[in-house]
Image (cartoon, rainbow, N blue to C red):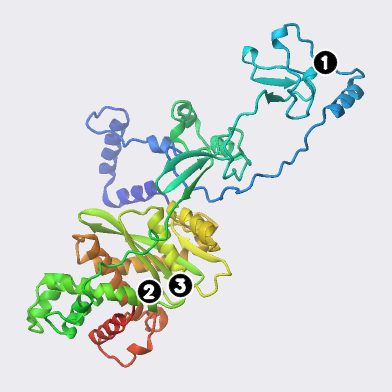
Amino acid sequence: MTQVSRFVIWICRHFTKTQIELIIKELTDVLANRNPEVKPRDDFQEKHPHWRKYSVDPTPPRSTPPTPTSPKLNWKQLLVDSKKKTGKEVSPVVIRNPKNAIPNHIHCHWCSAPQEYLYYNNGKQHSQVRCKLCKHVSPVSQRYRKPAKYWCPHCGHPLYLWKQQPDRSLYKCDWDGCSYFLSNKRKLNKLERLLLPTKSSQFKLHYSYAEYHFTEEQLIPSSPEKKDTDKLYSIRNTLNTLCLVLTFHISLGLSARKTAFVLRHVFAIPASYQTVLNYTQIAAYHCHKFNLAYKGDADPLQVGDEVCIKVSGKKGYAFFFLSPSRRKITSYHCASNREVLPATIALKEAIRTVPDKTNTITAITDGNPSYIAAVDFLNRTENAGLTHKKVIGLQNLDTESEEYRPFKQMIERLSRSFRFHTNAACGFKEPNGAIALTTLFTTHYNFLRPHAFLNYEVPCPLPQLQGIATLQGKWAKILRIATTIA
């Protein structure tokens, strides 16, 4: 059922027949431009569905030139074939103007015919010649071309360096006879074809490839700021108080002010909300090392998504990857955008602990094109053997979305749990606060939170936490283990 159909049903349920007639009359006035104060929504995007529709080409380019399929012609054989076909020999070209005489050293590029069968093809410019035998055009002097690095996977044409940016190089196929270009051009509707001569740059028609130049230093996941190592044991309160803060603020999802209220009025511990935030950031630095060291083996099938957060009043994103078998978080990363670099960082950390990387690793995400580029970068630089599967929208409109929809629902359930813990914060004042809460949420989710799918076991069971009954006791044990990690 379409959105319009659902809206019509809603109108019929909430309005009488007379009211519906008045609604129809008002809408008719709007469509007939009799109501200057109300205008329909601009339908430019609906009329031009391919306008600025950016997508990453999933097919990587060729790294070697394609093997020519047609053999080179022989001018002597062409003479013989022409005589058999017409009964006459092909006569040499008659040059009447001496200025148009072809030099002896010039030969046809396609069949090697000598200059007797060649003539200039572009008037007084004298830069190209046409062969009378094979009908092909050849340049008089070969133009210098830089050796190509990539070739189009659809037509084999060399890609040229289109744009150069600090973190990537963009290559593009400029041949108008490419099958990829012709296929995209045929998809344009009538209105888009009218705009094409003047707005050709606003339609993505040619094959393009982005080569990213990320360094190892850039591919490190976000981590909380390093505090004084001894500050964990030199706080004014006891370690049990700090673990009570983590229990209420992280495990139970209370805000910093509510946590301080509970400590002050239930446990008679004088603590402000700023103390709660300070303790959270102190513990997050140690828990980050604990998460990376004890997350265990990851599945060869990883499902990922990003969750929107607010940092300093601006939109930010927290990337997560999940192992479906144990429902454990294998990767997390906070960034200010959802482009290729943060997607690559999260995906690289997610597959770091896959035990057997000889088999294919599958990454399941939504339609964000950054994941496609991240998969290509890791396959090209680290030979990761990754394949990418997309789940598009809320309805299964293709077989791939239908097959992998259950895995996408797992990461959406994780996103709802994360939002429950971040909603109480109402945004973050600085990036370190978002990173700290994301880190501690991962610790709670993997090692402390029972999961119904696992018969109420935690996703990452540790023998060191067995026999500890309280959450604050488990937090204390985790912090003691984390401080011993180098």
Q: Which mark is residue 343?
A: none
Q: Which residue is mark 3?
A: 324
Pointer 3 or 1: first along the chain: 1
Helix or strand or loop: what does disc 2 sit on? helix
Of the residues under marks 2 and 3, which one precedes in the sequence?
2
- Is residue 118 or residue 267 the one in the foreground? 118
Residues at discs 2 and 1 in contact (Cβ within 8 Å): no
Q: Quadrant of residue 394?
A: bottom left
Q: Earlier in the sequence, mark 2 or mark 1?
A: 1
Q: CA distance from mark 2 to mark 1?
A: 78 Å
Vertical side of 332 occupied by 181: above or below: above
Point out residue 202 in the picture as x, y percentages from the top left corner: 43, 35
Q: Residue at x 25, y 77 (%)?
A: 251
The amino acid marked with disc number 3 is: Pro
Question: Can you give x and y, in whole percent of width and height, for residue 4 in the image?
Answer: 37, 46
User: In front: 11, or 70?
Assistant: 70
Which residue is tagged 2? 292
Q: Which type of secondary structure does the marked residue at label 3 adopt?
A: loop
Could you say which is closer to the camera, residue 376 or residue 442?
376
User: Which residue, as the protein is rendered here, is positioned at the far bottom?
Assistant: 467
Say which mark, if any, is on residue 92.
Answer: 1
Q: Nearer the viewer, mark 2 or mark 1?
A: 1
**Residue 445 shows up from this direction:** no
Label 1 near label 3: C-beta < 8 Å? no
Callout 1 secondary element: loop
Q: Residue at position x 76%, y 10% from top?
A: 95
Is residue 327 something that shows in the picture? yes
Q: Residue at x 32, y 49 (%)?
A: 12
Looking at the picture, which amino acid does disc 2 mark?
Answer: Leu
> In which quadrant of the rendered view does residue 234 lie?
bottom left
From mark 2 to mark 3, how far is it between C-alphas?
18 Å
